[in-house]
Amino acid sequence: MKRFTVLFVLVFAGTAAANAYLDNKKTATHDCAKDPDAMIAGNENTITFTGACSRISAGGNLNKLKIESVKVLDIGGNENTATVDAVDAIVTSGNKNKVTWTKGIADKRPKISNPGNGNKIGSTK
């Protein structure tokens, strides 16, 4: 039983690390065709997301995100900037974030939930 538990923990840790951005002040490109979910917990990163993502969660601060397509963009951190070509839902529970989007995926406009303070969410059109 111990071998199974250790193996499970190692496999899970390896999987989580592939889609989690925990460092600060890094530049990266994330291929959503390989891993459709991503989490940003670090600060002051610049990350480009290519392909169709399922969910991107940004809990860090001062990140710059360029996203080709995402079903759900969830920004819980502060002072992040996200530029999104296509999105279904935007949730901004953090503060002073800026999200611009071009179009919705399923509908013309994404569903927007903005319980945070001082966030700016708008279309590029």
Image (tube, helix red, strand yellow):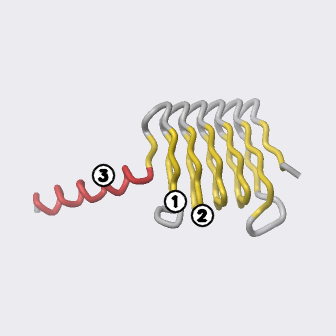
Q: Which of 21/48 is in front? A: 48
Q: Where does residue 112 sit, x and y in percent of width and height?
A: 76, 51
Regarding mark 3 in the picture, which secondary structure is present there?
helix
Q: Determine which of the numbered discs, if any, sits on residue 13 in the image.
A: 3
Q: Residues within 10 Å of mark 3 (few under 14, many from 20)?
A: few
Q: Earlier in the sequence, mark 2 or mark 1?
A: 1
Residue drawn 60% across the image and 39% down it: 76
Name the residue beneath numbered marker 1. 31
Name the residue beneath numbered marker 2. 51
Q: Earlier in the sequence, mark 3 or mark 2?
A: 3
Q: Where does residue 86 sit, x and y in percent of width and height?
A: 73, 60
Cβ–Cβ under 8 Å for marks 2 and 1:
yes
Q: Quadrant of the N terminus?
A: bottom left
Residue drawn 51% across the image and 54% down it: 30
Where is residue 72, by image quadrant? Answer: bottom right
The residue mark sitting in front, 3 or 2, is 2
Identity, as a three-letter code, of the amino acid under mark 3: Ala
